[in-house]
Amino acid sequence: MSEIQCLDEEIAEESAKIRKFLDAFPKKKLSPDARAAELENINSLISKVKLLIKTYKVELREISNPDEKKEYDLKGKEHEHVISKLCTDRDYAKASGDRSELMAGASVVSSTNPDQMSAKDIITEAGRVQEASVSSLDRT
């Protein structure tokens, strides 16, 4: 088995491992520290695959057979596309986790439905909001 075939298989295996981590990531209920550690693990795997792809490109230059070179070049482009998608998915998973962490302590601002309020209640609520806005502006 040639060096480029080994690299091809290793890149495919590592990409599958990253995909498995990313697919399981949103389902896990992790603390912020555990989530950061998991993302760091995913980042290190992605870095490893990017390095393998660079090595793959170096090995690709050494192939003399044009047909074989074309075949491995297509595989290399496919690997680059896969790692790009994995990076996008990692960024989405990170943003999703950050969002859920930020929203964990959030509460509903107003539980009143304006469609169910009388005109007097709406005016009273609007006055309260305006007073809060004025006091906020006074603090700045």
Image (cartoon, rainbow, N blue to C red):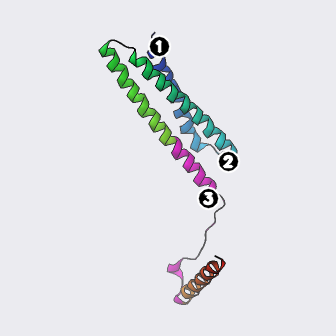
Nearest the camera: 10 or 125?
Answer: 10
Q: Amino acid at mark 1?
A: Glu
State the extent of the magenta-drawn residues as a range: 90-119
Does the image show residue 31? Answer: no
Q: Which residue is mark 3?
A: 103
Q: CA distance from mark 3 to mark 2?
A: 13 Å
Q: CA distance from mark 2 to mark 1?
A: 40 Å
> In the picture shown, does residue 119 fall above or below 83?
below
The kind of secondary structure element at disc 3 is helix
The kind of secondary structure element at disc 2 is helix
On-image quarter of the C terminus: bottom right
Nearer the camera: disc 2 or disc 1: 1
- Left or right of 3 on screen, residue 74: left
Q: Which residue is mark 2?
A: 32
Is residue 97 magenta-colored? yes
Q: Which residue is mark 1?
A: 3
Outermost residue toward the left? Answer: 67
Dot 3, how many residues are within 10 Å of its Cα: few (below 14), some (14-19), or many (20+)?
few
Nearest the camera: 139 or 29?
Answer: 139
> In the picture shown, does residue 101 fall above or below 55?
below
Is residue 110 magenta-colored? yes
Give the x, y percent position of residue 110.
60, 74
